[in-house]
Image (cartoon, rainbow, N blue to C red):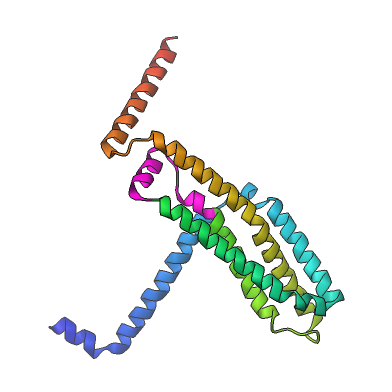
Amino acid sequence: MRGLRAVLSDPARNMLGAKGGESHMSKNLLTHLSKALDFRPNEILRADLFLGVAGGAGATVLALITPSALLRSVTIAAGLVGVIIGTVVAGVAIQTAFMDQSFLRKLRAINRDPIRYLAPFLFTAVLAILAMAGLTILSTFSVKSPAAILATISGLVGLFSIWAIISLLYCLTTLVQFMGLKVDALDVPDDPAEIEAAREILRQMETLREHLGGES
């Protein structure tokens, strides 16, 4: 009762605690996302990035030469980015629909990380969100806006938009690999006891192989 009375008597503290909890939760969510997007450099330095840089350079030049033409393309670009976001959501939904407990146990048995197959879709979604945010800002500009600011934002929007569009090809490749993984998982038993027995057999075979190699 005293605990309840203390809670009711200090609403300001409770509100601050709730806000602190929400802030901590949002930080945790961003931490999980950054861990999922922990790519190696060779997974970033690909053709989609270089084409995105070319698209950003083209958008910057277009903003400096004919800003009216650039601003007319904002609506089209926003529609394309919206389609990309929908495609990414569909791809993630397809993968997560197959990730039941049995399949996740099989992935653990063969030492595969399920997040690895979602990461390309998440990365494309982040690019599309950045592009959409830039397009939203760009839609408020006019031909009389400062040329330097218009060119800078146009370059960033062009980079993220083209990068997100081309990265869909790698998402499709990942989806094909995921379906191949589903086929490979058919050879893994469903029963956890059978999985552990299979692991034990593999360990014994590895030990025997090392023993025979030592004798030879």
The residue segment tinted magenta is 100-119
Task: Name the residue nearer the viewer: 196 or 181.
Answer: 181
Say which quadrant the C terminus sits in.
top left
Q: Main secondary structure of the magenta part?
A: helix
Can residue 4 be found in the magenta stretch? no
Q: Residue at x 42, y 40 (%)?
A: 111
102 vs 28: above or below: above
Provide residue 9's location: percent of width, then percent of height: 23, 90
| Quadrant of the image occupied by residue 138 | bottom right
Task: Name the residue nearer the viewer: 35 or 201.
Answer: 201
Say which quadrant the N terminus sits in.
bottom left
Task: Name the residue nearer the viewer: 133 or 37.
Answer: 133
Provide residue 77's location: percent of width, then percent of height: 69, 70
Q: Is residue 60 left or right of residue 37?
A: right
Q: Is residue 65 left or right of residue 88?
A: right
Q: Residue at x 61, y 66 (%)?
A: 83
Instruction: Single out the residue that lies furthest toward the right.
Output: 65
Can residue 110 be found in the magenta stretch? yes
Provide residue 112's location: percent of width, then percent of height: 45, 42
Instruction: Single out the residue that lies furthest toward the top.
Output: 216
Q: Is residue 175 left or right of residue 136?
A: left
